[in-house]
């Protein structure tokens, strides 16, 4: 039986509550399958920064690096800032993302039965995944490309052939593993950019095309980012895998989570070739922290993504079965209306939803 070491960073705000539910689910599924998880929690985040001036000690980073995977709640509080005004969540999230080269931000966007979408018509299906380039693009400007001088502010977008190739490969490989579009089961990767206006995005598209040529079995498509927001609302069934530059993907993935019931339903993974970190797409939501009302589903599903990734990396099919089992349990709880938090129209607390998923695992 294989043992996997997981570094857990519960973090701040609702982070610890939703992480606790996800851990209970993982511990239950571990009992049902032949693998074991060694979960070790570390204190990192804004609370820690406020107490000690350090957001994540070096030793914790080392543990994260040595772990088989990282599970995170959420990090940051509005009042925790560096003297220059920067929020401290970057001390953890950017540090792990950049130093462990977690270049692919994976954001599944699937509407579960029993959850109401604000979209008028979802009868044709809503189940796609956004792959976000995580370490380049416009946000990379913060590492030295920004400048404010003589009342003029500039930022620099960074697009490299290596970076675009890696993220495009990732997207096509993911499309090979998925079931295709809800529309007709065909596999497709959609490149989202602004190639008609900016040369950096035209370059993104041309490198994407070079990679697409190697995957003749998967069709390719393009959308300008402005039109993309429209398609996400009017015809989400068109999409299978969507790949985009860092900032564009950040924006369109918030929209996609709104279409599936909100941030509390949106899991995510930050994945590299050797390391990976899994966390809900939402932040610390300090306004609802400590009230047992946060939706733990995004974090529970992030835990399932973690098992799926470990399965592939260690060639251990039992973990993929366990991951599928968690998804089915979530599906059962939501579709039967067994337990839901207020953000998706229910009355249950965080703990109750976690317990309902644990119980559903045993059915
Ligand atoms: P960050 O800057 O860390 O991204 P944010 O300001 O974008 O944080 P979030 O913490 O993501 O904000 O939350 C935005 C809103 O969404 C919150 O006010 C909260 O009401 C809601 N929300 C987020 N996560 C959840 C959840 N798990 N369950 C219920 N509601 C949530
Ligand atoms: Mg946010």
Image (cartoon, helix red, strand yellow):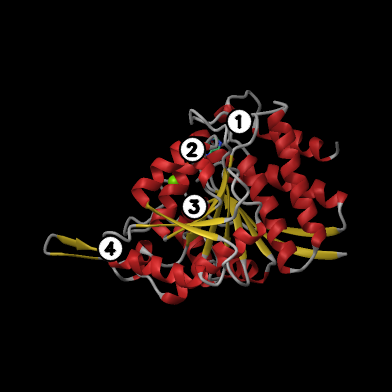
Q: Is residue 136 visible?
A: yes
Mark drawn on residue 46? 3
- Please report the residue visible at 75 percent of the width from the left and 41 percent of the height from the top: 328
Between disc 1 and disc 3, the foreground one is: 1
**Quadrant for the N terminus in the image:** bottom right
Residue 102, horizontal then vertical, whole percent: 54, 66
Label 2, residues with CA under 10 Å away: few <14, some 14-19, many ≥20: some
Q: Are marks 4 and 1 in contact (CB under 8 Å)?
A: no
- Which SS class for mark 3? helix
> What residue is shown with label 4?
198
Please state the horizontal and vertical placement of residue 26, each as a whole percent of the image: 76, 49
Residue that sits furthest to the left in the current view: 150
Q: Are marks 2 and 4 in contact (CB under 8 Å)?
A: no
Where on the picture, by quarter, is residue 175?
A: bottom right
Q: Which mark is residue 64?
A: none
For numbered disc 2, what is the local secondary structure?
helix
Q: How many other residues sit within 10 Å of disc 1, few (<14), some (14-19) or many (≥20)? A: some
Q: CA distance from mark 1 to mark 3?
A: 32 Å
Residue labelled with disc 2: 258
Q: Which residue: 75% across, 49% down?
A: 324
55 left or right, relative to 341: left
Residue position for label 1: 115
- Specify whether tag 2 is near ligand 1 (CB below 8 Å): no
* Label 4 element class: loop
Dots 1, 2 in contact, CB < 8 A: no
Q: Nearer the viewer, residue 128 or 136?
A: 128
């Amino acid at each position: 039986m294989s043992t996997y070491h997981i570094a857990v960073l519960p973090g701040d705000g609702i982070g610890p509550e939703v992480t606790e539910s996800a851990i209970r689910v993982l511990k239950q599924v571990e009992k049902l399958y032949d693998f074991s998880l060694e979960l070790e929690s570390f204190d990192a985040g804004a609370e820690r920064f406020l107490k000690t001036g350090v957001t994540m000690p070096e030793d914790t980073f080392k543990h994260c690096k040595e772990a088989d995977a990282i599970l995170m709640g959420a990090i940051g509080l509005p009042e925790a800032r560096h003297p220059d005004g920067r929020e401290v969540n970057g001390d953890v999230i950017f540090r792990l993302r950049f130093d462990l080269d977690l270049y692919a931000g994976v954001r599944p966007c699937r509407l579960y039965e029993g959850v109401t979408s604000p979209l008028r018509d979802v009868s044709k299906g809503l189940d796609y995944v956004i792959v976000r380039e995580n370490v380049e693009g416009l946000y990379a400007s913060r590492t030295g490309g920004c400048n404010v001088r003589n009342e003029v502010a500039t930022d620099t977008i960074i697009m490299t052939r290596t970076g675009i190739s890696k993220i495009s490969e990732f997207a096509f490989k993911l499309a090979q593993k998925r079931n295709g579009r809800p529309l007709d089961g065909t596999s497709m990767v959609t490149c989202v950019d602004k190639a008609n206006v900016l040369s950096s995005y035209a370059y993104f598209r041309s490198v994407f095309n070079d990679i697409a040529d190697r995957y003749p079995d998967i069709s390719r498509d393009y959308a300008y980012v402005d039109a993309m927001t429209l398609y996400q609302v009017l015809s989400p069934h068109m999409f299978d895998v969507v790949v985009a530059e860092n900032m564009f993907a950040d924006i369109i993935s918030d929209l996609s989570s709104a279409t599936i019931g909100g941030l509390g339903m949106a899991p995510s993974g930050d994945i590299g070739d050797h390391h990976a970190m899994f966390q809900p797409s939402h932040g610390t939501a300090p306004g609802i922290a400590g009230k047992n009302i946060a939706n733990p589903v995004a974090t529970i599903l992030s835990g399932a993504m973690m098992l799926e990734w470990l399965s592939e990396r260690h060639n251990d099919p039992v973990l993929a079965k366990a991951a599928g089992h968690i998804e089915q349990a979530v599906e059962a709880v939501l579709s039967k209306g067994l337990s839901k938090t207020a953000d998706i129209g229910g009355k249950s607390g965080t703990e109750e939803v976690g317990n309902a998923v644990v119980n559903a695992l045993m059915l």
